[in-house]
Image (cartoon, helix red, strand yellow):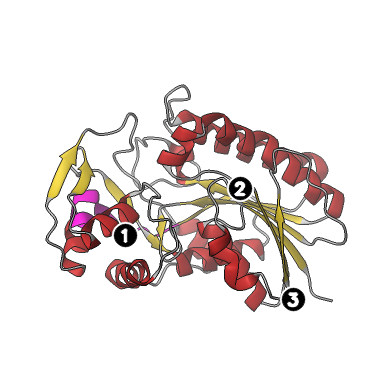
Amino acid sequence: MKKSVLITGGAGFLGSHLCNLLIKKGYFVICVDSLITGSIGNIQRLLKGKDFRFIKHDVTKYIKVKGEIHYVLHFASPASPMDYLKYPIKTLKVGSLGTHNALGLAKAKKAVFLLASTSEVYGDPLINPQPEDYWGNVNCVGPRGVYDESKRFAEAITLAYYRTHKIDTKIARIFNTYGPFMRKEDGRAIPNFINQALMDKPITVYGAGGQTRSFCFISDMIGGIYKLLRSRVNSPVNIGNPDEISVLKVAHIIKKLTESKSKIVFEELPVNDPQVRRPDITFAKSKLKWQPKVPLKKGLLKTIQWFKNTSVI
């Protein structure tokens, strides 16, 4: 029998790629999504497959699924600042109630549980790069706190279930990821820059653009998540690309790759926007035998081509 995987947020950017990967790996995939930020377009190619099932459901409410489930992957949550600033209470609820419900399902089914956490648990870090044992520098009452704290709570309850109920839990601390199937209006740097550049509109950089990020291509990211899922590691693991680059430099690279006539303009930096973001992936290299392979320019070219060719928003 095929093993079954349930993915909350499975119609989102990361979730839809994981659905596709796991089907290719021979799993039966159940995708659960409320479609607040996810899109049926992301999973359209999977809907007619015999190894895929879609359930429209808000995971902040009780999750009931018949039959065996071997893995529960909790990816439901707004992930873009634009989204969690628009849906602050829903973001908090999906990180708390949603995680509790997903863990309850994993407990009932005796399934392995994987939490999609985030580098945002480190806040605006005071050390760079950020290792897993860094506790972070987070403003819990700032506008970004609804996302940061929902994920910090999600990590805490996940490990509480691991320690109390002996559930096999995994925590992926996901750093900036990009690639095909990102929404055009996602609001994050790379999709913003690409769409502005393709339309020859001003490319908007926040602040002076000196803040740094580390961008991981989607195929590398889901490869790391899959290795974590199959591992014996229960503590949080950073998954991301350690190659650090300024936001302004990324804007210039995208402008050049798209041969755009856009001008780069500067806008006010959002409140509590992290000045640095770079994963220390020593642990992932050692325990998962994983590290990213796709260089930024190669990944950007693939992403730009997808945005040129797709009508999916």
Q: Residue furthest top?
A: 141
Q: Please, is residue 79 above or below residue 90 in the view?
A: below
Q: Residues within 10 Å of mark 2 (few under 14, many from 20)?
A: many
Q: Nearer the viewer, residue 112 or 310?
A: 310
Residue type at numbered disc 3:
Lys
Would you say 200 lies left or right of 81 here?
left
Q: Nearer the viewer, residue 31 or 141?
A: 31
Looking at the image, is mark 1 or mark 3 earlier in the sequence?
3
- Residue corresponding to mark 2: 76
- Residue corresponding to mark 1: 243
The residue drawn where x is 78% and y is 51% is: 106
Q: Residues within 10 Å of mark 1 (few under 14, many from 20)?
A: some
- Residue corresponding to mark 3: 50
Q: Quarter holding the C terminus? A: bottom left
Tell me the tag on residue 151: none
Question: Which quadrant would residue 62 be assigned to in this image?
Answer: top right
Q: Please, is residue 67 above or below residue 269 in the view?
A: below
The residue drawn where x is 73% and y is 73% is: 51
Q: Nearer the viewer, mark 3 or mark 2?
A: 3
Q: Secondary structure at mark 1?
A: loop
The residue drawn where x is 53% and y is 65% is: 222
The residue segment tinted magenta is 240-251
Q: Position of residue 200 (x, y in %)?
A: 17, 58
Q: Position of residue 49 (x, y in %)?
A: 69, 75
Q: Residue furthest front?
A: 311
